Amino acid sequence: MRVPADVRAAYKAAPHLTHVELTWREGRIEHWLRFGRPVTEQRIDYSRRIASFAPGSVFAFVRWASNAYGTIISRIDIVRVVEPGEAYQTLPFVRRGGDILLKLNGWPQVEKVLQTIDAVEALGIDPSDVAPDHWRHVHNRLAAGLPSSRYSLAQHRAWLARRNILP
């Protein structure tokens, strides 16, 4: 798929950032962020924009599409933005890719992840600040058809302390 010139320009203007192409065509294609803190956003046209993230940040990217017969894709990815030069995985509509912490398909799985995100927010914690290991845990448990553990305030405090001493 060829990247339009206006989208390429956004990538060239900030190559150190990770760019996520968001599209919203009501009832047909809906790509949106469930959480994350973009450092910049650029509107391309009425239905498209690009959200750009700094290295180290975490975001959730939801992709949904349908046709005349119903939903054809339902997907959620939680991604950590990598530093320049760091290894990464590629992902559609995410330019440069990132460290994929969670990747699930199908509405039942996506719905469980959205409920997990809601539970984290109910604790008063921004999901972008959650320990990356927790998102990996949620991915692994749901992929195996098992319930995941709830994120706790104690777990979050431990993660914040650990993050402060990590290089």
Image: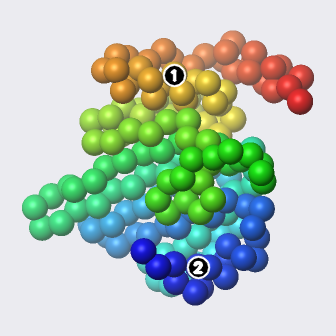
Q: Position of residue 105 (x, y in %)?
A: 33, 42
Name the residue type under label 2: Val
Looking at the picture, tell me which residue is in the foreground, 72 or 119: 72
Seen from the viewer's position, the closer of residues 164 and 6 is 6
Amino acid type, residue under disc 1 in the picture: His
* Residue beneath the point at 33% across and 66% down: 29
In terms of image quadrants, where is residue 108?
A: top left
Is 119 left, or right, of 105 in this rendering? right
- Residue 19 lies in quadrant: bottom right
Q: Is residue 46 above or below residue 123?
A: below
Q: In the drawing, what numbered circle is on residue 7?
A: 2
Q: Is residue 39 visible?
A: no
Q: Which residue is mark 1?
A: 137
**Quadrant where the image shows the N terminus:** bottom left
**Point 12% across, 67% down: residue:** 68
Picture quarter with the C terminus? top right
Residue at 75% across / 77% down in the picture?
A: 13
Q: How is the image coloured?
A: rainbow
Label 1: how many residues lie within 10 Å, few (<14), some (14-19) or many (20+)? some
Kindly tell me whether residue 109 is visible in this rendering.
Answer: yes
Quick check: marks 2 and 1 in contact, CB under 8 Å? no
The alpha-carbon separation of the residues under discs 2 and 1 comes to 34 Å
Label 1 residue SS: helix
Give how far across and how far down residue 27 sits, in percent: 27, 66
- Vertically, is 46 above or below 125? below
Residue 150 position (above or below residue 129): above
